[in-house]
Amino acid sequence: DGRWFAVRVAPLGSHGLVLVLAEDLTEMRRVEAIRRDFVANVSHELKTPVGALSLLAETVEGAADDPDAVRRFAGRMQMESVRLTNLVQDLMTLSRIQGDEPLPELHPVSLDEVIVEALDRCQIKAGARGIELSSGGRDGLKVRGDEELLTTAIRNLIDNAVAYSPENTRVVVATRQCEDDHVEINVTDQGIGIPDGDLERIFERFYRVDPARSRQTGGTGLGLAIVKHVTTKHGGEVTVWSKEGSGSTFTIRLPLLNAPREHVHSDDAER
Ligand code: ADP
């Protein structure tokens, strides 16, 4: 059936018995192929900004007596450097979280703080496109986790919501406590949406619905892969609902650390 096995034969004692061990190599080959694909993809992704930078450096040299052109090329060089830095940063984050080992240090993390921080980091980009960011839902929820990684995951979702939305729309981050001691963080946009056929693949590394658009917005193609791994590492999951032309909602679901005490009215307390 197309599977590969390594067979080892070892003699057992002096009675002519042998032990036969068959090791399934199919999985090893699959993992090796994924690794090779990944290295090829990374090399390709690195080549684009590095190639652009070297071309721009050559061009700027030839335009030394035209200050306007120098300024323009310098701006584009800066953009390509930012793209390169983001890619390396995302690769480092992914390499830290995609293995099987658990995260080293987990602490109680306030979702309110993480969401405020993630929104802050996206504010300039959103403001530049007239996109209004807001948050709502249940306050005071906590999870056990790595604050920086959770901030990165939520920030990646907000960044995408902004990048794949028209100007002057809204992005809302809302928390919800579920009955089964889990919490949901929903990031909803009024953007371009995702075709049904692509929904299953968008969490793969370097998968893009529209590569030209992703490149234009400066995306690394790793944002959602990071969100998926961060969520899984925290014992949760990420899901998406989307309608082309109307918008998308990405939902991160995590185990809740504390169920916040309900507010007790003084009347109730006296009863
Ligand atoms: P990228 O850097 O390309 O944004 P991601 O891994 O963050 O990479 O996302 C993968 C792809 O999923 C994007 O290229 C885009 O096609 C699609 N996508 C992600 N978020 C959204 C969204 N909120 N609305 C529409 N499409 C999205």
Image (cartoon, rainbow, N blue to C red):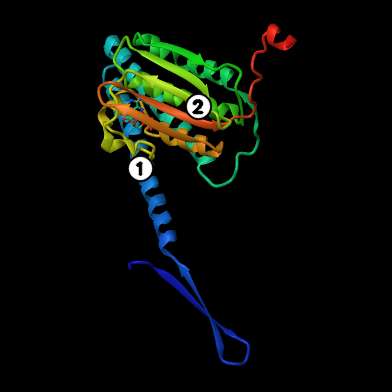
Q: Is residue 63 left or right of residue 170?
A: left
Residues 138 and 233: in front is 138
- Where is residue 225? Give x, y as percent: 43, 36
Q: Which residue is mark 2?
A: 184
Could you tell me which secondary element the residue under label 1 belongs to? helix
**Position of 101 relative to 9 (above/below):** above
Looking at the image, which residue is at 65% across and 33% down?
106
Decide which of tag 2 and tag 1 comes sooner along the chain.
Answer: 1
Q: Amino acid at mark 1?
A: Asn
Q: Amino acid at mark 2?
A: Glu
Say if residue 111 shows up in the picture. yes
Crowd around label 2: few <14 · some 14–19 · many ≥20 (10 Å): many
Marks counted in the figure total 2
Question: Which residue is painted at 42% across and 16% down in the image?
Answer: 172
Q: Which sits in the foreground, 9 or 190? A: 190
Residue 51's mark? none
- Going by the picture, which residue comes out furthest to the bottom? 15
Q: Quadrant of the C terminus?
A: top right
Residue visible at 41% across and 50% down in the picture: 35
Relative to residue 4, is residue 264 drawn left or right? right
Q: Quadrant of the rendered structure where residue 107 is?
A: top right
On screen, 12 above or below 233?
Answer: below
Residue 180: x %, y % from top left: 56, 32
- Residue 141: % across, % down: 60, 22
- Depth check, mark 2 against mark 1: the one in front is 2
Which residue position is annotated with label 1? 41
Instruction: Report whether 227 appears left or right of 146.
Output: left
Q: Quadrant of residue 102?
A: top right
> Tag 2's secondary structure?
strand
